[in-house]
Image (spheres, coloured by chain):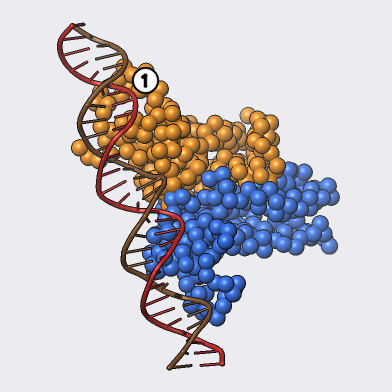
Chain colours: A blue, B orange, C brown, D red
Amino acid sequence: MSQGDVPANPRGEGGNGATRERNEREILAAAERVFAAHGYRGASLATIAEQAGLPKSNVLYYMGSKRGLYVRLLERMMARWNALLDDISVDDDPAEVLEAFIRSKMQLSRRHPEGSRLFAAEILGGAPFLQEYLRGDLRDWVQARAAIFRQWAERGLMDPVDPVWLIFLIWSATQHYADFEAQVLGITDRESLSDADVEAITAFLTRVILKGCGVTSRPQGA
Amino acid sequence: MSQGDVPANPRGEGGNGATRERNEREILAAAERVFAAHGYRGASLATIAEQAGLPKSNVLYYMGSKRGLYVRLLERMMARWNALLDDISVDDDPAEVLEAFIRSKMQLSRRHPEGSRLFAAEILGGAPFLQEYLRGDLRDWVQARAAIFRQWAERGLMDPVDPVWLIFLIWSATQHYADFEAQVLGITDRESLSDADVEAITAFLTRVILKGCGVTSRPQGA
DNA sequence: ATCATTCCTGACCGAATGGTCAAGATGCTT
DNA sequence: AAGCATCTTGACCATTCGGTCAGGAATGAT
């Protein structure tokens, strides 16, 4: 009865529906593309439906509303993000952790460029739907890792740089290649980024950032 | 007679109009905000007009069309960008140049956050209006500076890192604080970024990036 | 065969969209 | 005071927007 509900699907999840599953997948994929390209207000259900190969009514049948569809995409992307670098401890090797962070973030952006751009567009617009997440879960995520970085600095394993700014630096640098792909391709005169390109960029970022905050590239002792 | 023209203003520029100048300034400022927040398609002339304190018809009288207004904003932002770091040579000091680059880019993003976000939103959406600029002027700009970085590396003044990736790294890191302000503020629990914050971030980025690509912080000899 | 549930969709709605236009207000120049 | 260019704006238009709804098609269990 509240406004955000999906009208049908009373059984909660899945149902029997191979049909439902397939259509929802198709709709979510199309919606991710369109929202990423035009932002929330700029995206139209008609376009999404067209790209999903379904009539507009069918999209609304499955997703309930434009708003509902959008938050569902955001939640999917948040889940992907939260799975990142979930278990690090003070006793891990800074070089390994930072490299893994850069690499997995890079791959996340590459594997889900539309989701990445969708996220970026949402934040660009002031994060109207994500305020709660930013000030809650994500802040905790960042602060927890920042605390570990800080301890590393105390132990002399890296320079005493502000860990939060460091996380933002890594975030922005990796995000850039997904979000601003058009710019990267335009300036470097490429049609697309190859696996080799991505590997080269990852290596570059790892090298510069690790060296930049004084992390010794590999620990030789135990 | 072609469709993008501003119908009035036959005298080309400025005219006598203090009125015109004031109104155009008001409209451009409002439009920059609204386009930045919602993207091209998500922005509405009604909202822009309201924020400019003018009736919608008046906005169209001055700007001709939504499209025309938008490209005018983009051009203004490109001009600001082009004025950046316009004269560097191989004989300059890498540390000074890189620091100046980071600092002025940071200030540009801070001074014109809406313009910065507008640019970001345009590129995020695939840069439909900016393809030409990216593959032309901006590419030349980047390649010219990349050539200088490369020569510095040959002279042993910095590590032989890919200069184009380096420029993107600086671009993305500095851009981040304007474009993703909502994220930065949410995670760090701030209301806004103070001048001191910006100074701290600039110092952090300068330090990490310079050290990261092996630029000695200051040349002590001549 | 019956029946309930799920799936599907064209027709339709009020609101908002970008843009046009005609008619008048304002102000500068002579 | 006449004349002209600039400015201002409400009324209006075709199109598109997100969303509703009624009714029919599939589907599966009994």
Residue drawn at x 64%, y 55% is A206
Q: Which residue is at the front of the view, A46 or A195?
A: A46
In which quadrant of the rendered view does residue A161 lie?
Answer: top right
Quadrant, the N terminus of chain B: top left
- Which quadrant is the C terminus of chain B positioned in? top right
Q: Position of residue B80 (x, y in %)?
A: 46, 32
Q: Chain of mark 1?
A: B
Name which residue lies at 36% across and 20% down: B19
- Residue count near mark 1 (Cα–Cα under 10 Å), binned few <14, some 14–19, many ≥20: few
- The image quadrant that residue B144 belongs to is top left
Is residue B120 at least partly visible in the picture?
A: yes
Q: Residue at x 69, y 39 (%)?
A: B190
The residue nearer to you, when weighing B158 against A209, is: A209
Q: x and y percent of residue B78 in the render?
A: 43, 36
Q: Is residue B95 left or right of residue A88?
A: left
Q: Position of residue B200 (x, y in %)?
A: 69, 35
Position of A219 relative to A168 (above/below): below
Q: Nearer the viewer, residue A48 or A118?
A: A48
Q: Tell me the quarter of the picture where residue A37 sits.
A: bottom left
In the image, residue A22 sits, relative to residue B57, either above or below, namely below
Q: Nearer the viewer, residue B152 or B145?
A: B145
Look at the numbered disc 1 and give the secondary structure of its residue.
helix
Residue A77 seen in this snapshot: no
The kind of residue on which mark 1 rests is Thr
Q: How many marks?
A: 1
Q: Which residue is mark 1?
A: B19
- The vertical placement of D16 against B150, above or below, is below
Q: Position of residue D23 (x, y in %)?
A: 37, 73
Q: Residue at x 47, y 45 (%)?
A: B38
From the viewer's perspective, is B140 left or right of A20?
left
